[in-house]
Amino acid sequence: MLLLSRTTLLLGLMTLAGCDAKPQARSQQAQIQARGELRVGTLYHPLYYFLRDDQQEGLDYELALSFADDLGVALRMVPAYSLDDLFALLDAGKVDMLAAGLTSTPLRRQQYRFGPSLYEVAQTLVYRKGEPRPQGPEQIAGDIRVLAGSSQAEWLHALQQELPELRWETRRDADAEDLLRQVAEGRADHTLVEDTLLARTQRYYPNVEAAFSLSDPQPVAWVIDRRDDDSLLARMLTFFGEQQKLGTLARLNEKYFGHIQDFDYVDTRTFLRRAEDLLPRYQPLFERYAGELDWRLLAAVSYQESHWDPQARSYTGVRGMMMLTEDTARQVGVEDRLDPEQSIRGGAHYLASLIERLPDSIPEDERVWFALAAYNLGLGHLLDVRRLTRLRDQDPDSWAAVKENLPLLHQPQWHSQTRYGYARGREAQKFVNNVRQYYQSLLWLNNPTTDPGLATAQRESPPTVPPL
């Protein structure tokens, strides 16, 4: 979903070239470099910026860190707790730019300047599953809750000119995921959110559902203030062009959006129920044998393999909690594949060994997805797909590219060129995607205040974020 076309860049550069900038003693870019620090306003959110285990994460954070490095300065993230507060930081000159999943709307463009599009979102009306589903704006019954100062509020204000009877309210005491939770719990009739946020949140609140989209896709971009000086925007355009060529944008797209496309209501409900009733029985074993892996990742693999059933078996002969083959069980010292402790210990050892055996050229934050594919179809087949990816002039170290090419192992014209031949590549593709979804759900279930849904009520003592 990350979008940054050459046309966008060329139009931006042409616009800058045509600006009649007034001379200044020091440009905005020069001021930042003299200060030695890029100040970035943001919001706590799993897509923008958040803390997990004392580590800073988020799509906007990762890009901002690279942008600060490109400028030769340190990065300081400055979190705000509402949209109004966020824009107030920029208006007061306390930050140099905003990076928080902000959509480029007509009203905002009158007051601010936007960088290149990172990705696009569609504003989606959300209702509670089981309630009447509105088919269009004129069928909306009940209230709509949105965030104060949001693009959704701007959109509803315009829609109300056509539908005066439309009822909606803005809230300052919540964030977008808290509004989704209110709909899920029946405390609100509807909310309006981006489709990407809904797709992620359905893994935690499966009974919220999209009614319809209220707008065409809108670009999400970084924001700077309006001034005659174009230096920061020009550097931003150049930076994004370089990141596109390097494949950074594609990698981040895969990391943050690559696993959220498919949603299965029944599967999600079943998973959440078993995570509450069954997982506590085996969680100590996952924690004991995870080693350097996140125990929640190990538990997600086990759920995908066996649904946490120690007696599970498949027609291919794999068995147990981690569904080990006889050969793999022997390699990792497992005598009884149906023993939960032995299976979890063996599965953890095997997955860790796959990560270790991967080529060093694969980025650290993507190695686990490659290893999961190898866990499913074998390391030899994974290496075959990397070779096919290279043959197609794509990056074999990019999980997005390799994932796209996994289905080639089904096709004779491709698997005939490999060392290990045919394999169920589509199954491996789905396997990794499902594990990533279960893992994200377990992250949230295990610690909802540091992943999605950092509601205002949970932020009474915000963390201090030092400059990097």
Image (cartoon, grey):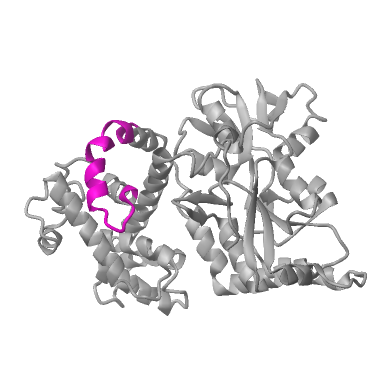
Position of 213 relative to 305 (above/below) = above
The x, y position of residue 402, in whole percent, is 41, 67
The x, y position of residue 159, in whole percent, is 77, 33
Position of 214 relative to 358 (above/below) = above
Q: Is residue 442 visible?
A: yes
Position of 189 with respect to 311 (left or right) is right
Q: How many marks?
A: 0
Measuring 80% from the left and 24% from the top, which residue is drawn there? 164
The x, y position of residue 287, in whole percent, is 27, 48
| Residue 273 found in image quarter | top left
Measuring 47% from the left and 48% from the top, which residue is drawn there? 260
20 in magenta: no
Relative depth, front residue between 56 and 198: 56
Q: Is residue 323 visible?
A: no
The x, y position of residue 382, in whole percent, is 31, 68
Measuring 21% from the left and 55% from the top, which residue is drawn there? 347
Position of 15 relative to 127 (above/below) = below
Relative depth, front residue between 453 and 205: 453
Q: Quadrant of the C terminus?
A: bottom right
291 in magenta: yes
| Residue 238 found in image quarter | bottom right
Relative depth, front residue between 158 and 32: 32
Measuring 49% from the left and 59% from the top, which residue is drawn there? 254
Which span is picked out in magenta?
273-296
Position of 381 with respect to 39 (left or right) is left
Q: Quadrant of the N terminus?
A: bottom right
Position of 415 with respect to 186 (left or right) is left
Name the chief secondary structure element in magenta: helix
